[in-house]
Image (tube, rainbow, N blue to C red):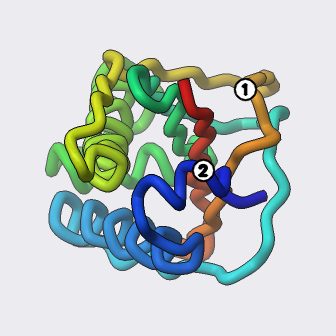
Amino acid sequence: MPIPAEVLASLNITNEALVKNLIEDTRSVYSTMLGMDLMHLPLEVDPMEHFKDSISAMVGLAGTYNGLVSIHQPISLALKVTEAMLDMEVKTVDQDVFDALGEIANMIAGNVKQHLSKGGMDIRLSTPSVASGSNYVICAKQSNSLNLLFDLDEEWILLSIVLEKE
């Protein structure tokens, strides 16, 4: 589902242009911070709520627009990402993994904020939150969500952005 038309109009951007910017921003974070090359999979992805053997890192948005920026990925990939970020071996999900993925979510949310803050709009970011487990649910309003799927080392990363105007 696309970003709401009123959000796009206030930003003076099309949904396609915003999606292109968000794909480039996300790829840039992984490339710059981790030396990893994400490949965007141009598939229409339905919002996900149920995750198995995964980790989700989330940053809330508040102000002119309210919402959530979240990144979801399998635990096995989260360990690889953490190893790349910290330049050390990581075998189990621990605070280092939570911190690394929270920081990645925070950087991507910062890019989203930058796009939304054009024209002086007030947007604040929350502290990152991370959830993981063998089977868990994350519920967020799905009607105004943008979901982008990426491939990294033949594993998936889902970026989900949920927005609504205040």
Q: Nearer the viewer, residue 68 or 94?
A: 68
Q: Callout 2, which amino acid? A: Glu
| Residue 96 shows in the view | yes
Q: Is residue 25 left or right of residue 85?
A: right
Tell me: residue 138, above or below residue 120. Answer: above
Q: Is residue 88 left or right of residue 62?
A: left
Tell me: residue 50, above or below residue 18. Answer: above
Label 1 packing within 10 angstroms: few (<14), some (14-19), many (20+): some
Residue that appears at 26% across and 52% down: 118
Rendering quarter of residue 80: bottom left
Give residue 161's position: percent from left, percent from top: 57, 45
Contact check, label 2 and label 1, Cβ < 8 Å: no
Residue that appears at 79% across and 38% down: 142
Number of on-image labels: 2
Q: Secondary structure at mark 2?
A: helix
Residue 140 marker: 1
Give residue 44's position: percent from left, percent from top: 79, 72
Q: Is residue 31 left or right of residue 135?
A: left
Give residue 140's position: percent from left, percent from top: 73, 26
Disc 2 and disc 1: Cα gap in Å? 20 Å
**Foreground tag (2 vs 1):** 2
Rendering quarter of residue 46: bottom right
Tag 2 residue? 6
